């Protein structure tokens, strides 16, 4: 017979964690009635995860009944001082109870008691009945319940990172204490979260020390007379009553008058009728689709269109919308399955690919006649496969919607349409399905209807988005930067970059040999052969056999995550070898093997640039991602050896901006000391080191420069004393001193930071020099951590975003100048602040002069923009 297992969930605690896990997306998570749903959504995900992991036979979610309990009767200030619960969270709690009903899970609350007491009582009953018990909460008070049969899972970060407390883990975490002694620790140290006092000046460490010596609060006071006279002894004597009261307050009741039996908690699965209705009410389409429940067809108004298989010039008119349909993301390779086009008077649709050879269609595409599209780059690349250079795209709904709100971009027309109140279109998922089931609908009429609706939506949205761009003064950003750039990126993608597959295969062999050498060394250091890629086996070797200190435990054993191993690097040579092994193995699988898979028949890779993803305006790259090659490692840098020009007498040429973000900071802040350093061509990190450490240029050491560099870049990202102390391995006090000294020397940088935050609080967004906006819904949050992140974002966005904008403007000007010249050189890649070209050797000097001039002069700042250029037979040699 299967073992009974009871899952007990602290409903209020986990729901609160869920609320803050998705708090940054608070305004995105609303249903059609305006109800916030972020806590419901995250709670659902957490609950499903824990159910899948634990597979309990019995389940209960316990909630607090109210603020008044037997503890507030004992101590009126119990939980006093807590900030008021956000209304956005409170409004979701009743719906979490509704969700649980749909999930087939019982919930329960008890007057005068907390959820902890319900959990404590049922956990004890279940353990006595030989159940295994798992408790889930964000409150460490519950760790006192841990026993041989009861495991307490505490949510560490968000709702997915779990720390499991068993009696062994409690002992490890609290220097030998038993779970029962957690109550005594709280009695002595108090609890700021629940606002009970403990003993003055006795913290957790002191409490643990006392308990290891005397066993309990009672034991401490039985031996109080034996203690040496000290301030601590005096505090213990004075606060004796508080210590015993705090212990009482910390003790979870295991005998509460709970009126629910274990048999009533048996889990029989979901109540699908209730759950489907709930998902629909909350607009949880993703959860609905996982149930494989078909949504009822949306009632749409009829739309007039014509399906055609023969084409004539009169069908192709000015000021039309155009949509090219492909069912796969990679538009370089995906089959085109249909085309639709038209204006407000007439819409046409076809699946006949003969249209691409029709002279009237080709002539229309190549004419500058005001075409509106959804994703200009995708459209341009797809049509280029039929040797058509599309001209005259004058509006892109995807790009415009992204610029207007980077928090709400969608890759589906229906998503954008819904955001703007246009409902006469269904999503691609509704029409085509998803995953393995994705495909054209059996009824052709449904397919053509969907294409026609996309054309109509593009027409409708274009007018609305155009007006909003003008109202927000973002029309120049759209028409002069993002739209022309989309076509330049399309041409770069089409050009691709040549990859030497033979060199990659050679590297595969080199890395394999290297991995075998490291593996052998690791086995020798361990004294036995084991699977290095198995966290479980590795944990046993490191923490049981080699006795290295345990940093962190997971549900399944010891953590061997990178951050854990980094802390152990100095303890044993094997750790360094394991980290190297992992890095090389990742480079081998992700880049060597990964690149070999995506080389096309022209011996090139054709990456796709995502123009509408990042919040700052930076581009990202996929299929393959050429921006993430790990160039700090020599093995990673070597990957660039495989990227070569298309012909033997050509070179790869690279140019990147030198410290562009710090130069932008100097310009935006107007700080004279920062500007002076750049104008005089000084090394900015050495200049900062001179000011922070009060030394001359000759006295700046490499360590001083390193520390100053960390401060410079830390300031750009709004770093805290804690963050800087971690980066530099110094105390928080020393880190704060660095920051204070920096601001003393660069006062206008501090002023800029304060003004950026103030302005963002007023406007609700931060903006770049070119009015690229990033909305910050959390900038006025009452939660300190959430608000602090938004404030750091307000400081960084104008800097990082303006740097991205400057590079884009340089790319547009370079494209224009290259096309106007006789040069054959081609712009191939953009990687962060770097542009990569291929160029005939004979044109190198001319290209170098042109690139330097354009990148350094297109945008004029208060400080000079400087580029570093290099070239060679491979991308590796060009660095």
Image (spheres, rainbow, N blue to C red):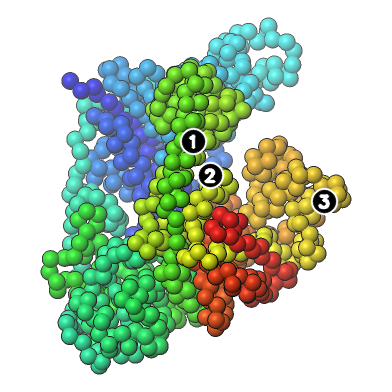
The residue tagged with tag 2: helix, strand or loop?
helix
Q: Nearer the viewer, mark 2 or mark 3?
A: 2
The residue tagged with tag 3: helix, strand or loop?
helix
Q: Residues within 10 Å of mark 3 (few under 14, many from 20)?
A: many
The residue labelled by disc 2 is 635
The residue drawn where x is 56% and y is 54% is 876
Cβ atoms under marks 2 and 1 closer than 8 Å: yes
Cβ atoms under marks 1 and 3 closer than 8 Å: no
Q: Where does residue 178 sit, x and y in percent of width and height?
A: 48, 16
The residue labelled by disc 3 is 690
Cβ atoms under marks 2 and 3 closer than 8 Å: no
On screen, residue 766 versus residue 730, left or right, reads left
Q: CA distance from mark 2 to mark 1?
A: 10 Å
Q: Residues within 10 Å of mark 2 (few under 14, many from 20)?
A: some
* Residue 213 visible, this orientation: yes
On screen, residue 580 versus residue 729, left or right, reads left
Is 236 situated above or below 436?
A: above
Of residues 155 and 459, the one nearer the viewer is: 459
Which of the labelled discs sits on residue 514, or is there none? 1
- Quick one: label 1 or label 3, which is nearer the N terminus? 1
Of residues 548 and 181, the one nearer the viewer is: 548
Q: Where does residue 64 sit, x and y in percent of width and height?
A: 39, 37
Q: Where does residue 357 sit, x and y in percent of width and height?
A: 25, 82
On screen, residue 431 versus residue 563, left or right, reads left
The residue tagged with tag 1: helix, strand or loop?
helix
Residue at the outermost front position = 648
- Quick one: label 2 or label 1, which is nearer the N terminus? 1
Of residues 858 and 668, the one nearer the viewer is: 858
């Amino acid at each position: 017979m299967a073992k009974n297992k009871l899952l007990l969930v602290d409903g209020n605690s986990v729901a609160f964690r869920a609320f803050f896990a998705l708090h940054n997306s608070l305004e995105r998570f609303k249903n059609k009635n305006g109800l916030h749903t972020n806590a419901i959504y995250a709670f659902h995900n957490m609950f499903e995860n824990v159910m899948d992991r634990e597979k309990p036979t019995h389940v209960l979610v316990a909630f607090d009944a109210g603020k008044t309990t037997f503890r507030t009767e004992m101590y009126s200030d119990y939980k006093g001082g807590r900030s008021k619960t956000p209304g956005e969270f409170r409004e979701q709690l009743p719906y979490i109870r509704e969700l649980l009903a749909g999930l087939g899970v019982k919930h329960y609350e008890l007057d005068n008691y907390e959820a902890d007491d319900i959990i404590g009582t049922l956990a004890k009953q279940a353990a006595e009945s030989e159940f295994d018990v798992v408790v889930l909460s964000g409150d460490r008070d519950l760790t006192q319940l841990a026993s041989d049969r009861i495991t307490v899972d505490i949510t560490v970060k968000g709702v997915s990172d779990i720390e499991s407390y068993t009696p062994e883990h409690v002992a490890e975490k609290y220097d030998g204490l038993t779970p029962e002694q957690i109550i005594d620790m709280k009695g002595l140290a108090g609890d700021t979260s629940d606002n009970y006092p403990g003993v003055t000046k006795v913290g957790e460490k002191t409490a643990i020390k006392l308990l290891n010596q005397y066993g309990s609060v009672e034991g401490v006071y039985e031996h109080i007379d034996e203690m040496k006279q000290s301030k601590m002894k005096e505090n213990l004597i004075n606060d004796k009553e508080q210590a015993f009261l705090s212990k009482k307050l910390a003790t979870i009741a295991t005998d509460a008058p709970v009126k629910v039996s274990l048999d009533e908690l048996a889990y029989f699965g979901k109540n699908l009728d209730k759950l489907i209705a709930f998902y629909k009410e909350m607009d949880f389409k993703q959860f609905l689709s996982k149930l494989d429940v078909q949504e009822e067809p949306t009632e749409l108004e009829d739309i007039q269109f014509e399906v055609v298989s023969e084409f004539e010039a009169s069908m192709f008119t000015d000021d039309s919308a155009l949509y090219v349909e492909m069912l796969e993301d990679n538009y370089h390779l995906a089959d085109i399955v249909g085309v639709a086009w038209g204006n407000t008077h007439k819409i046409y649709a076809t699946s006949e690919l003969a249209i691409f050879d029709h002279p009237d269609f080709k002539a229309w595409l190549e004419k500058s006649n005001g075409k509106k599209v959804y994703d200009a780059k995708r459209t341009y690349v797809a049509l280029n496969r039929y040797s058509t250079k599309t001209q005259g795209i004058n509006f892109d709904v995807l790009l415009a919607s992204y610029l207007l709100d980077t928090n709400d971009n969608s890759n589906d027309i229906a998503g954008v349409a819904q955001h703007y109140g246009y409902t006469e279109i269904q999503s691609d998922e509704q029409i085509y399905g998803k995953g393995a089931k994705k495909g054209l609908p059996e009824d052709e009429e449904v397919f053509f209807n969907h294409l026609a609706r996309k054309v109509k939506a593009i027409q409708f949205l274009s007018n609305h988005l155009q007006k909003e761009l003008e109202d927000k003064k973002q029309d120049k950003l759209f028409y002069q930067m993002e739209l022309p750039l989309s076509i330049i990126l399309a041409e770069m993608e089409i050009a691709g970059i040549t990859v030497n597959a033979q060199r990659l295969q050679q590297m595969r062999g080199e890395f394999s040999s290297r991995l075998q050498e490291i593996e052998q060394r690791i086995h020798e250091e361990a004294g036995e052969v084991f699977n290095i890629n198995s966290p479980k086996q590795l944990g046993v070797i490191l923490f049981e056999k080699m006795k290295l200190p345990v940093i962190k435990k997971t549900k399944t054993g010891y953590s061997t995550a990178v951050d854990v191993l980094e802390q152990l690097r100095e303890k044993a040579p094997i750790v360094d070898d394991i980290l190297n092994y992992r890095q090389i193995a990742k480079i081998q699988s992700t880049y060597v093997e990964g690149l070999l898979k995506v080389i096309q028949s022209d011996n090139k890779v054709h990456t796709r640039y995502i123009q509408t993803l990042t919040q700052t305006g930076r581009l990202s790259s996929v299929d393959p991602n050429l921006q993430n090659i790990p160039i700090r490692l020599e093995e990673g840098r070597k990957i660039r050896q495989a990227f070569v020009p298309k012909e033997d007498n050509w070179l790869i040429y690279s140019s990147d901006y030198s410290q562009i973000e710090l130069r932008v900071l100097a310009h935006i802040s107007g700080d004279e000391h920062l500007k002076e350093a750049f104008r005089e061509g000084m090394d900015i990190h050495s200049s900062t080191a001179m000011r922070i450490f009060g030394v001359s240029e000759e006295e700046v050491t490499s360590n001083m420069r390193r520390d100053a560099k960390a401060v410079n870049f830390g300031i750009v990202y709004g770093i805290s004393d804690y963050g800087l102390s971690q980066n530099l391995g110094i105390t928080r006090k020393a880190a704060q001193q660095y920051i204070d000294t920096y601001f003393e020397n660069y006062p206008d940088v501090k002023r800029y930071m304060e003004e950026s935050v103030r302005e963002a609080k007023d406007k609700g967004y931060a903006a770049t020099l070119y009015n690229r906006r990033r909305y910050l819904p959390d900038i006025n949050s009452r939660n300190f951590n959430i608000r602090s992140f938004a404030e750091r974002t307000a400081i960084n966005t104008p800097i990082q975003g303006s740097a991205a904008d400057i590079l884009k403007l340089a790319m547009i000007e370079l494209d224009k100048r290259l096309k106007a010249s006789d040069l054959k050189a081609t712009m191939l890649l953009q990687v962060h602040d770097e542009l990569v070209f291929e160029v005939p050797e004979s044109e190198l000097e001319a290209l170098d002069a042109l690139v330097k001039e354009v990148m350094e002069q297109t945008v004029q700042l208060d400080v000079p923009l400087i580029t570093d250029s290099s070239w060679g037979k491979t991308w590796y040699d060009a660095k």
